[in-house]
């Protein structure tokens, strides 16, 4: 499926598109950056005032295109977000400063297209757009994961907003003869730059459960630690498990030290003569360079 080139053709005729990988930006707050656009170019057109881009620690990117003079989304409107995902003008569309992806919203439906060397297409689900979503309220909000924009860490982008399109009720063809619009940034001043920033992931100990509830002299005792990645929330299903246990001052060797059914599992045989002593155990799980631990202490019962 090839992306309709209507918006670009109209945009070229209506206003100058940015051609250089540069752009003015306001001071960022946390990892939210506000880009200002000139206003009032055409009173009849959607007027982009600002574009706010942010991302969370999972790499989900949010584009907020503010258009106060268009409070609701109508069927005659069309939007395109063009992204140079590697911030490299030498790759992607050579006529558009190296743009690699475009998100197009038309007739209430948004799709993602990828530069294939000659055009922007979507073939057999490539590119993936599982996370792509949009909403509208006095402007367009688009969300997409950085992983679906080529695992981008730093990108340049621009936005096109059009209105005045006419859709043929029979063929579905779009007539842009009387379309008006706005581009941000406009006037060939350069693409907006943005850097994706995420916190380094960690392993988080979610729970530690003992079985039985207290260690018993002469019986097996098990601790199960459930850990998850901080960035995705995914529970660790494998990894290296280290178990440390002591009954009083005596070290007790673990009989089981592995991930079982999504939990780092340690099992010790509690010495038969250890009743009344304190048992202290620590479960540690390591996975892909990340590590977390959880400790446990209780009196050994008969």
Image (cartoon, grey):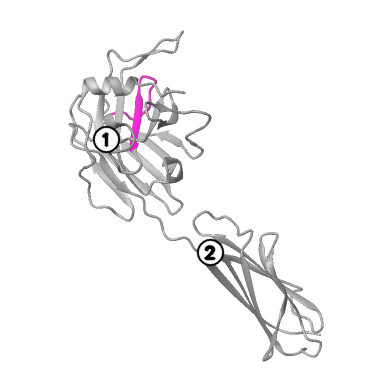
Dividing the picture into quadrants, the one containing residue 301 is bottom right
Q: Residue at x 52, y 32 (%)?
A: 125
Q: What number is the disc on residue 203?
A: 2
The correct choice, above or below, for 269 with respect to 153 in the image is below
Q: Which structural element holds mark 1? A: loop
The correct choice, above or below, for 221 with respect to 90 in the image is below
> x, y (%) of residue 284?
60, 72
Residue tagged 1: 97
Q: What number is the disc on residue 12?
A: none
> x, y (%) of residue 272?
81, 87
Mark 1 Cα within 10 Å, few/some/many (few <14, many 20+)? many
The correct choice, above or below, for 167 with respect to 227 in the image is above
Residue 77 highlighted magenta (yes or no): yes
Q: Determine whether, in the image, residue 121 is placed left or right of residue 228.
A: left
Q: Residue at x 69, y 90 (%)?
A: 248
> x, y (%) of residue 131?
49, 40
The residues colored magenta run: 69-83
Q: From where the camera sits, is residue 138 visible?
A: no
Q: Residue at x 46, y 52 (%)?
A: 58
> x, y (%) of residue 271?
78, 86
Q: Determine whether, in the image, residue 126 is placed left or right of residue 49.
A: right
Going from N to C along the chain, the mark reached first, 1 or 2, is: 1
């Amino acid at each position: 499926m090839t992306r309709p080139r209507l918006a670009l053709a109209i945009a070229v005729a209506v206003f100058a598109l940015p051609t250089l990988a540069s752009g003015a930006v306001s001071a960022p707050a946390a990892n939210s950056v506000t880009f200002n656009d000139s206003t009032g170019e055409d009173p009849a057109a959607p007027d982009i005032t600002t574009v706010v881009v942010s991302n969370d620690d999972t790499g989900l990117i949010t584009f907020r295109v503010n258009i106060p003079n268009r409070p609701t989304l109508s069927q005659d409107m069309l939007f395109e977000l063009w992204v140079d995902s590697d911030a490299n003008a030498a790759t992607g569309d050579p006529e558009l400063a190296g743009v690699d992806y475009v998100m197009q919203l038309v007739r209430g439906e948004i799709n993602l297209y990828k530069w294939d060397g000659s055009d922007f297409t979507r073939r057999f689900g490539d590119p993936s757009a599982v996370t792509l979503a949009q909403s509208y309220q006095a402007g367009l909000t688009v969300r997409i994961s950085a992983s679906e924009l080529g695992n981008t860490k730093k990108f340049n982008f621009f936005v096109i907003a059009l209105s005045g399109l006419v859709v043929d009720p029979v063929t579905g063809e779009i007539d842009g003869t009387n379309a008006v619009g706005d581009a941000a940034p406009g006037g060939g001043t350069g693409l907006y730059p943005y850097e994706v920033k995420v916190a380094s992931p960690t392993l988080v100990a979610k729970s530690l459960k003992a079985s039985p509830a207290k260690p018993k002299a002469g019986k097996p005792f098990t601790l199960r630690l459930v850990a998850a990645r901080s960035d995705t929330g995914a529970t660790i299903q494998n990894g290296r498990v280290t178990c440390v246990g002591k009954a009083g001052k005596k070290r007790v060797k673990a009989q089981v030290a592995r991930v079982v059914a999504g939990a780092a599992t340690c099992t010790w045989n509690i010495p038969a003569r250890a009743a009344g002593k304190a048992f202290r155990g620590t479960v540690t799980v390591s996975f892909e360079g990340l590590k977390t631990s959880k400790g446990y202490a209780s009196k050994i019962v008969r």
